Amino acid sequence: MFRKLLIANRGEIATRIIRACSELGITSAAIYTEPDRFALHVKKADEAYSVGPDPLLGYLNAHRIVNLAVETGCDALHPGYGFLSEHPELAEICQRRGVAYIGPEPESIRRMGDKTLARQTMQAAGLPVVPGTDQLGSLEEALGAAASIGYPVMLKASGGGGGRGIRRCNDPQELRRNYQRVISEAEKAFGNPEIFLEKFIESPRHIEVQILGDRQGNIVHLFERDCSIQRRHQKLIEIAPSPQLSPEQRDQVCRFGVAAARAANYINAGTVEFLLDQDGRFYFMEMNTRLQVEHPVTEQVTGIDIVQEQICIAAGQPLSFGQQDISLRGYAIEFRINAEDPKNNFLPSFGRVTRYYSPGGPGVRTDAAIYTGYEILPYYDSLCAKLTVWARDWDGVLRRSRRALKDMGLYGIRSTLPYYQEILDCPEFVAGRLDTTFVDRHPELLQYTDQRTTPVAVIVAAAIAAREGL
């Protein structure tokens, strides 16, 4: 097993990896930029090292990060998610410097990171893919393909991810308007101007399969997650297992997930994402070659620590279980607690957390990057905590989730907490009838009263009372 592991990330995922290291007896080393000096992951890690004053560049300089790992005696590096986690260059630099990379091989990252190449790989493996094209060479080629496939269509960045570089086109006019725009977005966001076109699937369910593969050739799935509750391709709520799949559908999509991993010669943890159309047909969408934000829901229903398995696989150990040893237990729901104001078009909410306390009780888990007094900074993703709730059945997880969301205290900033309480009371959600249009179809859920921010009058009154000794 490794002696010391450098975590090339920040926030709640860094604290999550620190916990896994602690249980495995591995020394954890955090990195931080100057604005993150007082971040929770810096406080929690065994060691912490500055990577400069710039709030972002320090987390994005692969050579500097790996050099730091070598200089500080780290024999392994975990990229977390986001930042450099899907950049094959980081894995390649680790290989050259003799630092174990906690993730897949660079070639798998590169192949699956290119969406058109990933489509070709899955087609060759016999998996169903959304009707579409390979890399587009011109607007005229895109117009011809769209006419053949039928509108609406989606223009997508080949190197895209995280919901960026995607535009829906309902007719040729929209395709003409969006074509160069998507190329520009792709170049700016991913450094790759290549784009492709896919048929738009109306009101799909978003289903993804968690897989693990070791260096001995063993590949297993940890069943599926339902990520249909999303806004602008950004996931908000994740559920495991999906409440809307039949046993036959579950078996089919999980077999697809394992087949996709084998086609990619995949090692370590990954996620294969599918769209399920209204006629019950699955289509491969993409493969994420990293740990997912929503991995806790899978851990809750399988009892498997995915991060520890990642580390053990990277150390050359075989999986400690086979497919027959993995079973589902109940349901879990993960709520992404974002520092955003849903009532104001999900505008990011920066500032100081005046009070924070996490809920507890059976089946309740919190992965957080915040504490009372912590400053939500404008440089990073708005995710500040994840609340994951487990129960033995669907009704039970809904009841427990309502209680846990009510118990969670987050004051001083706007957050998505009260919005999730509204979603949990929506009859469509209660019935488990979910698709990716849910948020757009239910604007009435935004008509809530948010009592979680601390009014100025209350702060002033408290200060006066303290001064007068009341």
Image (cartoon, rainbow, N blue to C red):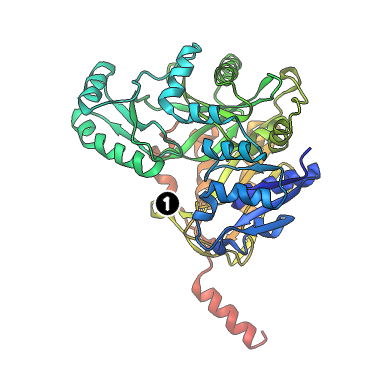
The extreme bottom residue here reads 468
Name above or below for residue 31 compared with residue 66.
below
Left or right for 455, reference 317: left
For this rendering, which residue is in front, 280 or 174? Answer: 174
Q: Position of residue 361 (x, y in %)?
A: 74, 47
Left or right for 100, reference 25: left
Which kind of residue does numbered mark 1 sit on?
Phe
Q: Can residue 326 be seen in the rendering of this structure?
A: yes
Residue 391 placement: quadrant? top right
Residue beneath disc 1: 346
The extreme right residue here reads 25
Q: Can residue 8 be seen in the rendering of this structure?
A: no
Q: Residue at x 48, y 17 (%)?
A: 122
Q: Check the picture and name the quadrant holding the C terminus.
A: bottom right
Q: Position of residue 403 (x, y in %)?
A: 64, 48
Residue 210 placement: quadrant? top right
For this rendering, which residue is in front, 73 or 320? Answer: 73
Q: Position of residue 246 (x, y in %)?
A: 57, 18
Q: Residue at x 49, y 49 (%)?
A: 419
Q: Check the picture and name the quadrant holding the N terminus.
A: top right
Q: Position of residue 228 (x, y in %)?
A: 49, 33
Question: How many tags in the picture?
Answer: 1
Q: Residue at x 44, y 21 (%)?
A: 119
The extreme front residue here reads 96
Name above or below for residue 414 compared with residue 16.
below
For this rendering, which residue is in front, 417 or 307? Answer: 307
Name above or below for residue 118 compared with residue 368.
above
Left or right for 396, reference 449: right
Crowd tier of the residue under label 1, counting other residues whose Cα lies within 10 Å: few below 14, some 14–19, many 20 or above: some
Left or right for 367, reference 139: right
Mark 1 lies on a secondary structure that is loop
